[in-house]
Image: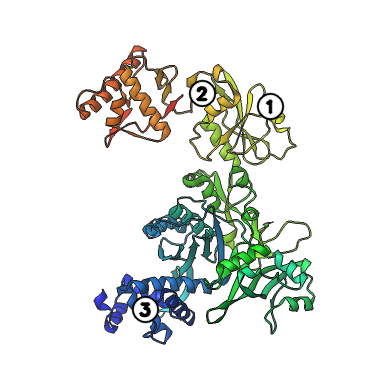
Amino acid sequence: MLDALTEDGVVAAFAAPDLPRLYLDLLQVLHDLGTPLGADALHDAAAECGVDRSDWPIEVRELAAELWARSIRRREYARLLVLAMITSHERAAAGARREYASRTPRACESPHQRVRALEDALRPWFVEEQLGDYVEVKLRPEEGGFGLCILHGGRPIARRAVRNGTRETIRYQPAQCDTARYDALSGRLRVTSRSERVASEYCTRIGEVLFGDPAFFSTKRVCTLDPLRRAIDAGQLPTPHPRLGILAVRLVDCLWGQDDGFRVRLHGSRTRDCIDRIRQLQFHLDEGRFEDARLEFVFRGARGFDVVRVVIKAPNLIDPKGQLHREEIDEYLTEIGVRLAPEEAAPAEPDDLWALGAGGHLLSRWRRLCGDDTRAALQSRVLYQSLLDAIESDGERRLVDAVEDATGEVLVAVPAEPGDGLRLAVAPGDLAGYALDGRRLAEQVADALGCRPSVATTVIDGCYDLNTLSIGAVGVRPFLVTRQPQVPPGTLAATLARAARPDHAVAIVPEGRAVDPSLPAVAMRRIVPPFDGLIPEIVRALGIEERVPLLDRVPLGTRLVVHVAGNRVWLDRIELTALSPQARALLVSLARDQCAGTSTKTDDLMRRLPGWADGTPSNRAKDARKYALDCIHKSFVAQGASPPADLKSVIRAVGGVYRLGDGIRAYVE
């Protein structure tokens, strides 16, 4: 392939029916960097990387092709191209950058080894969104972080064309490129993407793959433009502290709008500061709001003055143009209140069932809550497609009423606050979300617990009666609470107690949430079955352990039950009375390993069992398993019960490790 990198070889390759992958990369480079904007990005990247430019071509497309050819043989040019592509796309989409804050700023270990895993994590989402299955991630390690260039398909497009004397429709998916940059010192992830949903998905997957936590980055607010309004009232921006070395700071221009949809871009005059201009025009600032602003900072540099412009757009975009003086600029913006402190930016509540139980939400928020259970929740229709009930605008949550415009394509968000006539045009994809079907979830929980009948009914809004659950001789009435009850404080317990009579009322609520203190409650940790542990937790919450036999309070579907204090073991509700001490110890160890999610090597397990110290390891392992299964068989026969059909697979030996069979769920108390 490299031998074909001549003028004749390139011409021959482009004339061939199938274009090699190498030349597809060339087309991408020409498309992204073969422009004046791309040439600027290439020169800026070379200056940052320390690459000599004395022999570079002048013509922009020739320059892009030449550097692509050099990148194949020289690593520094390959890194330069990635940096230039990131820079070019960031500049081309200045209004589409979003910033996310991490929980705890830290560096990512070996990000280049996880690029393929990031592609694999993003691909199913792009397929689900009908954006195609092509995802390619290019990474450039940077000092204190990394940069990502993410290539993927766009929405399908159909165009009418003429070919061979006939008209036909050409359908294709345009190639798109998004970027992401992470700064380990500040813990900020800056994503450039025109779609908020795509940016949110990047936020989740980068956190999951590169940092091991899907919720590592949050979508909380990072900035507000309210201090600029106060600065205009005062006649000037706050004076920087001398320690920051800022010689001057000016409000270069800003976008101001009213609730009726009127917008105006305000620029500075000769001094390039527009505060005086705004005051002269006598805008009624209280009747509108600032949507974005550009500040200009002046510093003393090595060869004169360094001028840095910063684009600010609420709620999560602060974009300094360049790498100079970022720390000083951030400190100044924090001091005047534009960049919010962490405690101010934090969301009001976590992403749990109560926070997401009402209305539609982005799928990325459900993934942060459900993790690997998200797909099962979608398949079971516990989560269904729904328009978002609110959007974030200028850091404020505005309720949405979706309507179509005259073309039937554009959706409009109409805030529901009285007297607010603001209408914000929103892309249809940004209003697509998923909502919780509370009744379907309640019926699944009722069926999993064994409630009869398993058809849930609504007691109050968001609270479902799961009907009667019999635990031994005790009647229990569980209620699933999917959102904060809208009832006067102290009345929920009485309401549910009346509905439960003569059974015991118990509430099932998200973990960490509290209901009426006088109402027993258990934690709801997932929204798809199996709902392990709910029955034992209900027994403990009601304090009826002494009134309920052990076998009646274990999770449904449990086959192996171990009562350590009583030295008793049951399989399929048959007590294993013929177990020897060695066989009993083996089953107890395997049950504990399964409940703890661990495994023990056969040799280590054998050392725990009394009387199995003699013989070779393989013989000990084989004899222990066979002996334990014989004891189980004798226990069933002694009580007149048929041994389990899968008796031989109750204990399995895989890769030198003993474990319980795949269909054997254990409970240890």
Can residue 404 be seen here? The reply is no
User: What's under tag 2, amino acid-wise?
Assistant: Arg
* Farthest residue, direction bottom: 58
Crowding at mark 2 (Cα within 10 Å: few <14, some 14-19, many 20+): many
Q: Is 618 above or below relative to 122? A: above
Dot label at residue 553:
2
Location of residue 631 in the rendering, given as x and y in whole percent from the top left corner: 30, 18
Location of residue 501 in the rendering, given as x and y in whole percent from the top left corner: 67, 23
Crowding at mark 1 (Cα within 10 Å: few <14, some 14-19, many 20+): some
Q: Residue at x 66, y 41 (%)?
A: 484
Quarter of the rendering occupied by the N terminus: bottom left
Q: Quadrant of residue 153?
A: bottom left
Residue toward you, 92 or 211: 211
Sequence-earlier tag: 1 or 3: 3
Sequence-earlier tag: 2 or 3: 3
- Along the horizontal axis of the image, is 219 left or right of 597? right
Dot label at residue 338:
none
Q: Quadrant of residue 116?
A: bottom left
Dot label at residue 497:
1
Crowding at mark 3 (Cα within 10 Å: few <14, some 14-19, many 20+): many
Residue highlighted by disc 3: 67
Q: Are marks 1 and 3 in contact (CB under 8 Å)?
A: no
Q: SS class of the residue under badge 3?
A: helix
Tag nearer the camera, 2 or 3? 3
Measured in 3D between alpha carbons, the distance from the residue under mark 2 to the one under mark 3, in whole angstroms, is 70 Å
Q: Is 249 above or below relative to 567? A: below
Q: SS class of the residue under badge 1?
A: helix
Can residue 630 be seen here? The reply is yes
Measured in 3D between alpha carbons, the distance from the residue under mark 1 to the one under mark 3, in whole angstroms, is 75 Å
Location of residue 421 in the rendering, given as x and y in whole percent from the top left corner: 75, 63
Q: Is 305 above or below relative to 579? A: below
